[in-house]
Amino acid sequence: MVEMFSPCCSLPFILFTLFFLSIHAQTLIHGTCKVCSQQDPTVNYQFCTTSLEAASGSRHADVRGLGKISLRLTHTNVSDTRSHIKNLLKKKGSSSQKMRLDDCFELYSNAVTDIKHAMKSYKSKHYDEANVLISSVMDAPTTCENGFKEKGNVVSPLTKRNNATFELCGIGLSIIHILLVGTN
C-alpha cells in the first residue's frame, strides 16, 4: 500500500517548520535591530523590533528585505503624515500654527518624492544614493518640529509623527550601513 502523505508533510513537521521559521525571523529582526540601535543611538531597539515585526513580509525577510520593509514603512508614515497635515490645515487655528503647518506640508511633500526615489535606488542596490535620499527624508521631521519650537507658544501637533518618521529613517539608514559594510 502506498502512503498518500509523506512524513515531511505531516502536521507536526509543518508546525515545527512554521515555528522554526517564526523563531528565525524574530531572531533576525531582533539581531538587526540590536545592531541598528548600537550603531545609531537615534534608533530605539523597541521601536525597531515592534515596527518590523508588525510589518507584512518581515517573517520571511533577510536583512535586505528588512531594509525594504523599513523603507516601505517610512513611505507609509510620510504619506500619512502629509495627509494628516493637509487635514490640520483645513481646521481653524492660529496664523502662526498654520504657517508652521504649511512649512511642514511642503517638507513632507518633498519627503514623499524622496522616499519613493530612495525605494527605487534601494531596490537597484544603489545604496549610496538611497542613503542620501533617506537622509533628506530624515531632515523633514526635524525641520518641521524645529519650526514649531522656534515659536515658543506654538505646540506641534506632529511631534509623535515626526519622531516616528525620524526613527523609521534611522532604521533604514542603519540597515543600509549593514549592507554596505557586508558588501565591502
Image (tube, rainbow, N blue to C red):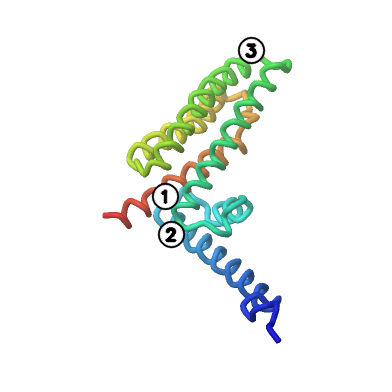
State the residue in front, 138 or 1.
1
The amino acid pointed to by label 2 is: Val
Q: Position of residue 130 (x, y in %)?
A: 39, 38
* Mark 3, secondary structure of its residue: helix
Snapshot quadrant of residue 23:
bottom right
* Mark 2, secondary structure of its residue: helix
**Pointer 3: what residue?**
95
N-terminal label among 3 and 1: 3
**Pointer 2: what residue?**
35
Q: Is residue 184 left or right of residue 144?
A: left
The amino acid pointed to by label 3 is: Ser
Q: CA distance from mark 2 to mark 3?
A: 44 Å
Does the residue at mark 1 contact the one at mark 2 (Cβ under 8 Å)?
yes
Residue 174: which disc?
Answer: 1
Residue 105 to residue 80: above or below:
above
Does the residue at mark 2 contact the one at mark 3 (Cβ under 8 Å)?
no
Residue projecting furthest to the left: 184
* Mark 1, secondary structure of its residue: helix
